[in-house]
Image: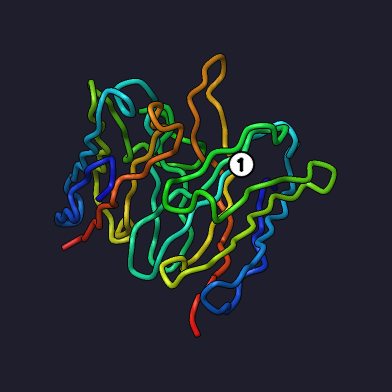
Amino acid sequence: QSVLTQPPSVSAAPGQKVTISCSGSSSNIGSNHVSWYQQLPGTAPKLLIYDNNNRPSGIPDRFSGSKSGTSATLAITGLQTGDEADYYCGTWERSLSVWVFGGGTKVTVL
Amino acid sequence: EVQVLESGGGLVQPGGSLRLSCAASGFTFSSYPMSWARQAPGKGLEWVAGISDNGDGTFYADSVKGRIAISRDNSKNTLYLQLNSLRAEDTGVYYCAKVAVAPYTDYYYMDVWGKGTTVTVSS
């Protein structure tokens, strides 16, 4: 059971929007910044969003992040078949001095 | 180009040991914390260990505490993960990641990941 809770899967048609939630607590999301990682099938994870809502260079603005209280959300607009991947949220858990990941969400483009 | 490259994975018997290496290039290695994460077959990501930029601070997940050790050699731009008393549940792909810190904060994130090295624990 992951410290951060994500839905196992979300899906939508091409061009539509999906949102992925990441729920935590005051000792992790509530007191830290959240980052998001994309893992395409058979590849290593890649940083998608950092500091709650910042995109590294090269990441399209179709991907956006937000945080409110003890939850964070990743939104993908204009969904493309190439967005089919697993997505993970992550942050520092202050009470245990460990990094924690969510369980991951599989995005399927219908 | 900023990159990290893992090596050292392989097949090991239960109870055995293995040392993974991660060679860094394209950035000032000694200025950044580093981490190891792993992924069991068909499962999600699991962070296992982290180390400060100078190596003085080390952090471990409860699932591996006491059995693994993270270390670094800043003169060789290399990160290590010593795996001991290996169990079947340690099987998976082990990733090395460079850790970035948001300016003027202590908020961390993993900005560069390697391709991973596979560890298989089986008799």
Residue A45 lies in quadrant: bottom left
Residue located at (57% from left, 47% from top): B97
- Is disc 1 surrounded by few (<14), some (14 to 19) or many (20+) residues within 10 Å? many
Left or right position of B10 against A74? right
Q: Which of B71 and A56 is in front in this view?
A: B71
The quadrant of the picture occupied by the C terminus of chain A is bottom left
Residue A109 lies in quadrant: bottom left
Left or right position of A32 against A3? right
- Vertical arrangement, residue A98 with respect to residue B18, above or below: above
Callout 1 secondary element: strand
- Vertical arrangement, residue A27 with respect to residue A45, above or below: above
Badge 1: chain ID: B
The percent position of residue B19, horizontal first and vertical second, equals 67, 63
The percent position of residue A47, horizontal first and vertical second, equals 46, 44
Left or right position of B29 against B119? right
- Please identify the residue farthest to the right as the structure is shown: B75
The percent position of residue B30, horizontal first and vertical second, equals 75, 35
Q: What residue type is labelled 1?
A: Met
Q: Which of A21 and B77 is in front in this view?
A: B77
- Vertical arrangement, residue B98 with respect to residue A40, above or below: above
